[in-house]
Amino acid sequence: MKFLPLTSRNLKEIYRDPVPMVFGTAMPVVLLLLFTSIGKKAPVEIFSPLMLVPAVAVFSFGFLIMFSASLISRDRQTAFLTRLLMSPLKSSDFILAYLLAFFPLALLQSIVCFLVGTMLGMVISWQIFLVLLFLLLLAVACIGIGMILGSLGTENQVAMGGSILMVIISLFSGAWMDLKMVGGIFKTVGYALPFAHVIDGSRAILKGSFWSDISVEFYWVFGYALISIILGIIAFKWRMKQ
């Protein structure tokens, strides 16, 4: 539990400036309202609330990558982490402290998406908890990716890398188009990444599918979450030795 004081400090640092948090939760609301409005004028299934909620939630996690990467990069460049290296904390403690600090924001983003989706007509049941599990696993992976970026890059590099990742999520997640229908490089790259698996699995659950139908997607995302955290620890340890 040595990481808890650092987690508390990170929470204060994150929520001291409410603008990123407000932006990270307001943007999904705007996107849901916008695409639902489009769906009413052009009745395409992908623009229905049930299809949009998982897509927008996954897209919003791109902000988690940017926010987590920015914080750890800023702490590293201001020598805050260098001073902490004198403490008995391990690299895994540092990463866990940053991970837990951003977890409430991921949960808030998911809940906001479901609340807005419900107001727009989406019917939810107990299966929403399985969807939340899917989304939060992806959140862990995204925060882990942010830790890798923040450990290796400067603030300017992190901003550019985060923007590129947002574009990648938009194009290859299947949020706004059916990757299987598009095919080609979009399908190949999309299903090599975790985002499309989360969206497909979440949509299937909301449509009434059983665990056996989405277990492959779940393990795929779980593997990404585990690998991203391990790589985050390795990248952080390597950078701190420099």
Image (cartoon, helix red, strand yellow):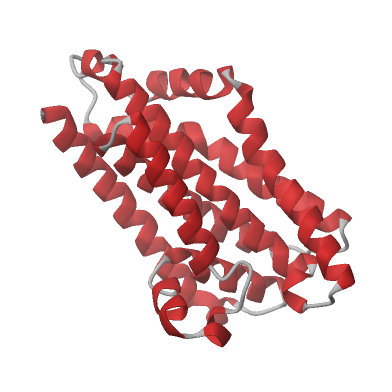
Vertical placement of residue 44 versus 62, above or below: below
In this picture, residue 10 sits left or right of residue 57: left
Q: Quadrant of the N terminus?
A: top left
Q: Quadrant of residue 211?
A: bottom right
Q: Position of residue 166 (x, y in %)?
A: 50, 52
Q: What residue is rendered at 21% in x and 17% in y?
A: 82
Q: Position of residue 24 (x, y in %)?
A: 62, 39
Would residue 196 be seen by someone viewing this image from the given angle? yes
Vertical placement of residue 116 versus 188, above or below: above
Q: What residue is rendered at 69% in x and 48% in y?
A: 28
Q: Nearer the viewer, residue 151 or 181?
A: 181
Q: What residue is rendered at 14% in x and 37% in y?
A: 238
Q: Position of residue 57 (x, y in %)?
A: 63, 54
How many marks on residues?
0
Q: Nearer the viewer, residue 34 or 129?
A: 34
In this picture, residue 77 sits left or right of residue 101: left
In this picture, residue 242 sits left or right of residue 92: left
Q: Quadrant of the C terminus?
A: top left
Vertical placement of residue 202 versus 74, above or below: below
Residue, far left: 242
Q: Quadrant of residue 47?
A: bottom right
In this picture, residue 126 sits left or right of residue 63: right
Q: Nearer the viewer, residue 112 or 40?
A: 40
Would residue 1 be seen by someone viewing this image from the given angle? no
Q: What residue is rendered at 48% in x and 35% in y?
A: 67
